[in-house]
Image (spheres, helix red, strand yellow):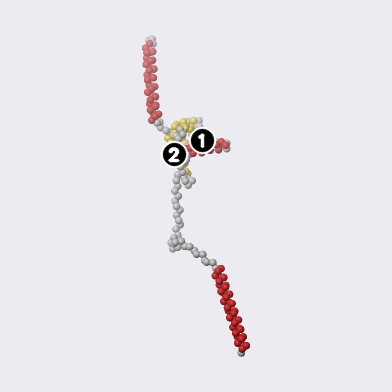
């Protein structure tokens, strides 16, 4: 009987030891799993997000303000013309004409004449007070001469916009009318020649009387 009890107690101790070892192993494994697990990334939800139950509407692109690109000053345009002329001379190319630095609004039509090359126009650059002879096809800073008629010139104006586009329109410039100063000077010179003619006639009358009949 004592041997049987001893065997039972021994088996019970072995089973108890195995169970305690299993508990420690499970606890250690659970602790390792807890340390290895990373916290799940929290997803931020915007408060002002789109309503999932509302129909999707694409955003409207903001309308860009398109403006006219203004021409630089006359001094800057003359400097650009000089640089282009030097570059053309170095490259042995035809140099641009001075009119390429002028705006259409800076010219006045002084006269129109007929030459062996056809019609030509004399224009005056008002900012610099210089005159040039131009022909159809002549280019300017913001346009080109298209045709020369009897008493007017037809130009094609180009307007550059901020988005890179160019708008073209037709512009007609008439001959410059004589100013009031020119009219007054012409009126003063006309009567001055009249007394001279009368004096010539009066001098001829005594000579005619002195002639023998």
Q: Residue furthest right?
A: 3
Task: Say which residue appears at 44% left-offset and 61% top-offset.
Answer: 47
The N terminus lies in quadrant: bottom right
Q: Secondary structure at mark 2?
A: strand
- Judge by depth and name the residue closer to the eye, 9 or 170: 9
Task: Say which residue appears at 44% left-offset and 39% top-offset.
Answer: 171
> Can residue 150 be seen by looking at this rendering?
no
* Disc number lying in front (2 or 1): 1
Question: Which residue is disc 2 drawn over?
Answer: 171
Task: Say which residue appears at 49% left-offset and 63% top-offset.
Answer: 43
Residue 93: percent from left, percent from top: 56, 37
Q: Is residue 104 above or below residue 37?
A: above
- Judge by depth and name the residue closer to the eye, 197 or 32: 32
Of callouts 2 and 1, the N-terminal one = 1
Mark 2 packing: few (<14 Cα in 10 Å), some, or many (20+)?
some
Q: Secondary structure at mark 1?
A: loop
Residue 194: percent from left, percent from top: 38, 21
Q: Based on the displayed image, in which of its 4 quarters is residue 8 positioned? A: bottom right
Q: Is residue 179 above or below residue 44?
A: above
Question: Which residue is disc 1 drawn over?
Answer: 97
């Amino acid at each position: 009987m004592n041997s049987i009890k001893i065997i039972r107690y021994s088996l019970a101790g072995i089973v108890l030891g195995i169970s305690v070892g299993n508990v420690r192993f499970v606890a250690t494994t659970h602790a390792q799993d807890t340390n290895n697990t990373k916290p799940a990334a929290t997803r931020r939800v915007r408060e002002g997000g789109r309503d999932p139950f509302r129909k999707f509407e694409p955003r409207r692109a903001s309308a860009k303000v398109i403006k006219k690109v203004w021409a630089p000053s006359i001094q800057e345009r003359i400097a650009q013309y000089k640089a282009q002329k030097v570059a053309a001379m170095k490259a042995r190319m035809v140099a641009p004409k001075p009119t390429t630095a002028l705006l259409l609004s800076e010219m006045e039509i002084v006269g129109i004449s007929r030459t062996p090359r056809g019609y030509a126009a004399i224009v005056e650059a008002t900012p610099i007070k210089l005159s040039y002879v131009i022909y159809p096809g002549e280019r300017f800073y913001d346009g080109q001469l298209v045709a020369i008629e009897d008493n007017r010139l037809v130009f094609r104006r180009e307007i550059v916009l901020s988005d890179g586009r160019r708008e073209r329109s037709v512009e007609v410039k008439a001959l410059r009318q004589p100013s009031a100063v020119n009219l007054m000077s012409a009126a003063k010179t006309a009567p001055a020649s009249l007394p001279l003619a009368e004096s010539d006639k009066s001098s001829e009358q005594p000579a005619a009387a002195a002639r023998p009949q």
